[in-house]
Amino acid sequence: MMKEQQPKIMIVDDCSVMRSLLRNLLRAENYAVVAEASNAEVALELMKKVTPDIICLDIRMPNVSGLDLLKEIKAEHPHIHVLMITANSDKESVVEAISNGASGFVVKPFSSNKIMTALNKVKAKISEEPNSNNPQSVHKEMDHQEAKEMGEVLDTLPDNPELT
């Protein structure tokens, strides 16, 4: 039986401790971490050299936010899946991330179980795509199960009236 190939992952987070924690967790689960970036500019430059299947992306970063970077990634590389991993859990950010093409959302602090569950869902989406290099296969409407899961994520988020 052929061994299933793990997706290639890029980590984009301005916090070096968070990148290290995530890298160690992913490598322990045999994921291939192919690149790391501390900001959007470095991430975009690295994407010219290596094409990840999944990008783990923080929202709050200096200069260019993760939400703005998400839009750039999806415009230039619609086949790349983006998993938002962030402490920024206000509902507006979650809705904006998902509506701009994020494949999932994990709130920091996270457990290894939450990360692996989210990555396994993204990995399943990748394996369902007829041709992962075909942008047509990525831009589909959210199905009922995905909409239900997104509703569950939104229901678990705290209300942050001080965030605008």
Image (cartoon, helix red, strand yellow):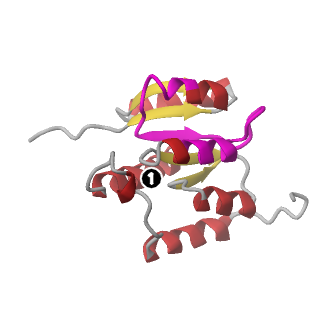
The residue where tag 1 is placed is: 117
Viewer-side residue, 34 vs 111: 34
As drawn, is 112 to the left or to the right of 51? Answer: right
Horizontal and vertical percent position of residue 117: 44, 53
Looking at the rendered structure, the number of numbered marks drawn on it comes to 1
Viewer-side residue, 106 vs 125: 125
Quarter assignment of residue 91: bottom right
Quarter assignment of residue 54: top left
As drawn, is 126 to the left or to the right of 102? Answer: left
Measuring 80% from the left and 66% from the top, which residue is drawn there?
159
Q: Which residues are magenta?
A: 45-73
Q: Determine whether 108 is above or below 154 in the image.
A: above
Which amino acid lies under the numbered mark 1 shown in the image of this protein? Thr
Q: Is residue 153 visible?
A: yes
Give the structural element (helix, strand or loop) at label 1: helix
Residue furthest toward the left?
A: 1
Q: Is residue 20 visible?
A: no
Residue furthest toward the right?
A: 162
* Residue 1 within the segment the image draws in magenta: no
Measuring 54% from the left and 40% from the top, which residue is drawn there?
56
